[in-house]
């Protein structure tokens, strides 16, 4: 059985179109239009990560940090729900969520950071939940229940998982443009280059 045959109906449709695109005689513009017509959507994207996870595992053991991940997921999942977000994927100490409205994603990120910081006040250093968040907004290809593809997805992943420090929220220019009037936050431009993002901002909250 081929790999494609094991996928869901939406994923099979996408990869059949991609296979058509590989042919020498392919009408790329027509195929791309079909793909965007079938799967194109506009979302705000959130990627999160826990700072120091790998180093902490070496020091305190994986079971301890499985507990930290469990407590973190239990803490933030209801916050995502409250802001009309969809928790799309959880992988290790990282999660991905989608929001229809950029301001909902931003407010959710702020509340998640604040909730983690409140809990950390009564925890030891090794038990602290040190959250890093990246946010983006734009057109994506959403395929099935758990997959999205697009430039803003790539940029947001880089911000949340590789660039943001603990307690930080980093956003692409697409978020800043639509949320700059949001009360209680300010945006500080950052001198970093992230593929897929024309500009990057740190959120002061």
Image: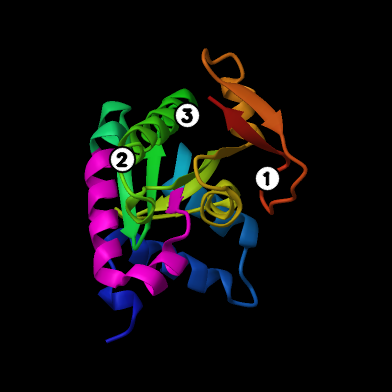
Which residue bears the numbered disc 2? 86
**Distance between the alpha carbons at the discs numbered 3 and 1:** 17 Å
Q: Over which residues does the magenta segment extend?
A: 48-77
Label 1 belongs to which residue? 197
SS majority, magenta: helix
Q: Which element is circle 1 on? A: loop
- Residue 99 seen by the camera: yes
* Precedes in sequence: disc 2 or disc 3: 2
Residue reaching furthest to the bottom: 1
Q: Secondary structure at mark 2?
A: strand
State yes or no: residue 69 in magenta. Answer: yes
Kindly identify which numbered label has been placed on residue 106.
Answer: 3
Q: CA distance from mark 1 to mark 2?
A: 23 Å
N-terminal label among 1 and 2 = 2
Residue 170 in percent (x, y) is at 58, 39
CA–CA distance in space, label 2 to label 3: 14 Å
Quarter placement of the N terminus: bottom left
Pointer 2: residues within 10 angstroms few (<14), some, or many (20+)? some
Is residue 7 rendered to the left or right of residue 39? Answer: left
Q: Position of residue 20 (x, y in %)?
A: 52, 71
Given residues 109 and 179, the one toward you in this image is 109
Q: Is residue 169 shown in magenta?
A: no
Q: Quadrant of residue 70?
A: bottom left
């Amino acid at each position: 059985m081929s790999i494609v045959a094991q996928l869901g109906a939406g994923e099979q449709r996408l990869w059949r179109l991609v296979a058509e695109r590989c042919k020498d005689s392919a009408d790329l513009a027509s195929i791309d239009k079909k793909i965007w017509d079938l799967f194109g959507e506009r979302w705000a994207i959130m990627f999160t990560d826990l700072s120091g996870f790998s180093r902490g595992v070496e020091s305190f053991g994986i079971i301890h940090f499985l507990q930290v991940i469990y407590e973190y997921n239990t803490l933030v999942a209801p916050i995502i729900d409250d802001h009309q977000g969809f928790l799309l994927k959880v992988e290790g100490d990282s999660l991905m969520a989608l929001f229809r409205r950029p301001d909902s994603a931003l407010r959710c990120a702020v509340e998640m950071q604040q909730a983690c910081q409140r809990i950390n006040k009564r925890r030891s250093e090794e038990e602290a939940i040190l959250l890093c968040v990246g946010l983006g907004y734009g057109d994506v290809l959403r395929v099935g229940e758990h997959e999205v593809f697009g430039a803003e997805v790539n940029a947001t992943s880089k911000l949340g998982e590789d660039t943001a420090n603990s307690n930080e929220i980093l956003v692409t220019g697409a978020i800043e443009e639509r949320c700059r009037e949001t009360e209680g936050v300010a945006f500080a431009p950052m001198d970093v280059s992230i593929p897929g993002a024309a500009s990057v901002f740190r959120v002061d909250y």
